[in-house]
Amino acid sequence: MVLKIILSENYHETDEYFEKSFNELEEYFNFGWTRNIPLLFLIESRKEMDLLEGRKTEDWCMGTTKGRLVFIFSPESLEKETCHTYEKNDYLMVIKHELVHVFTNIISKNKYFPDWFWEGLAVYLSGQNNFKKKVKEFKEFLKYYDNGGSGVYYESGFAIELLINKLGKDKLMDLIFNWKNITNKEEFDNAFKKIYDFEPNYETFNKLLK
Ligand SMILES: [Zn+2]
């Protein structure tokens, strides 16, 4: 008997992009990853997403990660199961976005990050900022520490971009790789202050924008 596996016609494209993103992020984080590398799974229904998350998920949620595994709605199921329309480039960037979460998680050994930092890094490194209107004034992203929400994806990506471009990638990498015992907002803000000489606040971020 011949085992027949039917792959989505988009399979090769998503898989290739996943591999390309993996190589880019490996280089960016300077993190050699040879064993138990990340895997991409395409899911077909909201029910599967709800099971993965252990709750009823919002219709804007397109993907998630569990350890080194990335789950994302297949191109064919995206419009049916989410509020998004399928656009190839947007879709591919979501794959990279989720993969950034996997890298951050593994490298930082699951330390606590505020949602704005966690999502901002994924938005920035996946290139999603390039398709958004530039922020003129920060006034929202620091609301997102322990709570997520669809509003976290806008300002936070630009906040991370500024931290990297104006204050250096090394500082941000230091925070992700080296700082230990970050388990809550207070500890994160303290570590952030030791590295950057300020606690996260709109005034300083808005100055960096100038
Ligand atoms: Zn995310």
Image (tube, rainbow, N blue to C red):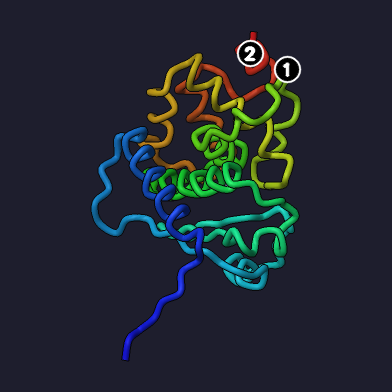
Q: Amino acid at mark 1?
A: Lys
The front one of 184 and 172 is: 172
The furthest residue to the bottom? 1
The front one of 164 and 193 is: 164
Whether the residue carrying mark 2 lies under 8 Å from ligand 1 is answered with: no
Asked where in the image residue 129 lies, by quadrant, the reply is top right
Quarter containing the N terminus? bottom left
Label 2: how many Cα within 10 Å (few below 14, some 14–19, many 20+): some
Instruction: Count up the numbered dots.
Output: 2
Residue 45 circle label? none
- Residue that numbered label 2 is attached to: 209
- Residue that numbered label 1 is attached to: 136
Q: Amino acid at mark 2?
A: Leu
Q: Give the residue displayed 50% in from the left and 63% down from the top.
A: 9
For the residues labelled 1 and 2, the Cα–Cα distance comes to 8 Å
Q: Give the residue displayed 51% in from the left and 16% down from the top.
A: 197
Indicate the position of residue 70 as horizontal and vertical percent values.
48, 57
In the picture provided, is 75 more to the left or to the right than 173? Answer: right
Q: Give the residue displayed 71% in from the left and 53% down from the top.
A: 60
SS type, badge 1: loop
Q: Is residue 50 above or below residue 36?
A: below
